[in-house]
Image (tube, helix red, strand yellow):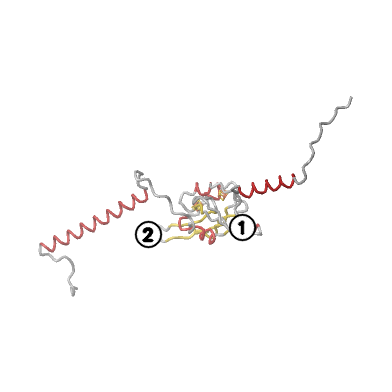
Amino acid sequence: MAASLPPTRPRIPGSGLAKGLAVTLRTMTRKHGTEQYPDTLPELPPRTRGVIGLFEENCTVCMLCARECPDWCIYIDSHKETVPPAAPGGRERSRNVLDRFAIDFSLCMYCGICIEVCPFDALFWSPEFEYAETDIHELTHERDKLREWMWTVPAPPALDPGAEEPKEIAAARKTAEKLAAAAQAEAAQAEAARADGAPAGPEEGDA
Ligand code: SF4
Ligand code: SF4
């Protein structure tokens, strides 16, 4: 015996339209997450991984970042230069001079490994993100552009009040204290010599 179908409810004319309008109204009043970029710029956290900035004065061309990059998208060229000895009779030294530093952001996966491994603090995250291009080849950015982005890197957060003094600052402070103490001792010596009646230094007109 064939199963009988349940009786269909009679349709109220216009009920579909009313349901549709109800959905529209509900959606219009709900808070939405769509950002109207570029008319409205997103509010990003200050430490956003937008792009990588290069502080080339700190770069010693050690190549560590290029070697550790999982995507091999850091391109560095350099040459060697001979530096004259620091003191007379010393040995000449050679140093690497940066010729090219570029990152291909079409390959970069923003892992941050290059920034982590750089031993000389030459790479930083910048929150800048507006560098989309219509041609993928233009996503390889050279050192001038990476340097420009460096100035958009936010300042480091303040140290905790009880934190240990950074070793660079401690070393600079110790050197400044030593120089100040030496200058003070010299001034005291000159003062003592003047008090004893001895000439403190060559007089004007001395041969
Ligand atoms: S963030 Fe990662 S993928 Fe991008 S350049 Fe640095 S190491 Fe390479
Ligand atoms: S790791 Fe740092 S210092 Fe070494 S080449 Fe890369 S950016 Fe320069």
Residue 36 appears at what percent x and percent y? 60, 55
Measuring from the top left, give residue 20's x and y in whole percent.
71, 47
**Nearer to me, 25 or 7:** 7
Near-viewer residue (129 or 66): 129
Location of the N terminus by quadrant is: top right
Identified by mark 2, the residue type is Ala
Measuring from the top left, give residue 88's x and y in whole percent.
35, 61
Callout 1: SS: loop
Question: In whole angstroms, how far apart are the C-alphas of marks 1 and 2?
Answer: 46 Å
**Label 1 is placed on what type of residue?**
Ala
Q: Which residue lies under the disc numbered 2? A: 86
Image check: 22 left or right of 35?
A: right
Q: Is residue 6 above or below residue 54?
A: above
Say which mark, if any, is on residue 97: none
Quadrant (top left, top right, bottom left, bottom right) of the C terminus: bottom left
Residue 82 relative to residue 197: left or right? right
Which numbered mark, 1 or 2, is in the foreground of this view? Answer: 1
Q: Residue furthest left?
A: 196
Q: Is mark 2 within 8 Å of ligand 2?
A: no
Residue drawn at point x = 78 percent, y = 45 percent? 13
Of helix, strand and loop, which one carries label 2? loop
Q: Are marks 1 and 2 in contact (CB under 8 Å)?
A: no
Q: Residue at x 11, y 62 (%)?
A: 195
- How many labels, in total? 2
| Residue found at the far right of this picture | 1
Drawn side of residue 187 relative to residue 40, left or right: left
Q: Quadrant of residue 6?
A: top right
Q: Which residue is mark 1?
A: 132
The 10 Å Cα crowd at callout 2, few under 14, some 14 to 19, many 20 or more, is few
